[in-house]
Image (tube, helix red, strand yellow):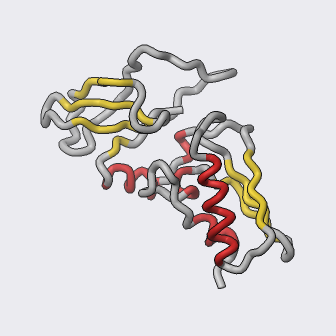
Amino acid sequence: MRTPYEVAAAVTDPEMPMLTLDDLGVLRDVADDGDSVVVTITPTYSGCPAVAAMRDDLVRVLDEEGFDDVRVEVVLAPAWSSDWISARGRRALAAHGLSAPGPAPRRDGPVTLALTPTRRDVRCPRCHSSEVAVTSEFGPTPCTALYRCATCLEPFEHVKEI
């Protein structure tokens, strides 16, 4: 039988299913006292619409593995950082045509929301060119921005540095 951590670590992100919650850095802790399992997650941002799906998926898979009393706690501090994405997660993003984030900006205090395009050190995940341009700060998920490569002309998503 797998441990509760092993089970929880294999749950995939509902918005980026090529990543597990563990590889995304959202899975923070799994405590098992023998009677109950408490899973702690930190969403990529406080208003993340995928939190309910993450919670439901965690409870469902742990229940299917025989863990009956499962509770998922959402913790917002410390705030999630894109630096928490594992090396395996970064490789999975690239393998699926998404540009992985670079180092997160260091800030004291809250992260501000900018509605204007931000210049990032981004390379095309297909041809690796740095000749890219942002087309939209908001991609299919709030955690991604849309870019277009000037070399191969392909559009792609970039996971934002947070």
Q: Residue furthest top?
A: 116
Occupied quadrant, residue 83:
top right
Towards the viewer: 24 or 102? 24
Rendered view: 80 above or below 41:
above
Occupied quadrant, residue 66:
bottom right
Please report the residue visible at 51 percent of the width from the left and 53 percent of the height from the top: 14
Relative placement, left or right, of 100 versus 81 is: left
Please report the residue visible at 54 percent of the width from the left and 32 percent of the height from the top: 162
Q: Residue furthest bottom?
A: 1
Relative placement, left or right, of 5 versus 68 is: left
Residue 101 is situated, as x and y percent measured from the top left of the image, at 43, 38
Total tally of numbered discs in the picture: 0
Q: Residue furthest left?
A: 152
Relative placement, left or right, of 73 versus 23 is: right
Relative placement, left or right, of 80 versus 75 is: left
Residue 103 is situated, as x and y percent measured from the top left of the image, at 48, 35
Please report the residue visible at 56 percent of the width from the left and 63 percent of the height from the top: 11
> Quarter of the image containing the N terminus?
bottom right
Residue 81 is situated, as x and y percent measured from the top left of the image, at 58, 38
Please report the residue visible at 65 percent of the width from the left and 67 percent of the height from the top: 60
Rendered view: 35 above or below 112:
below
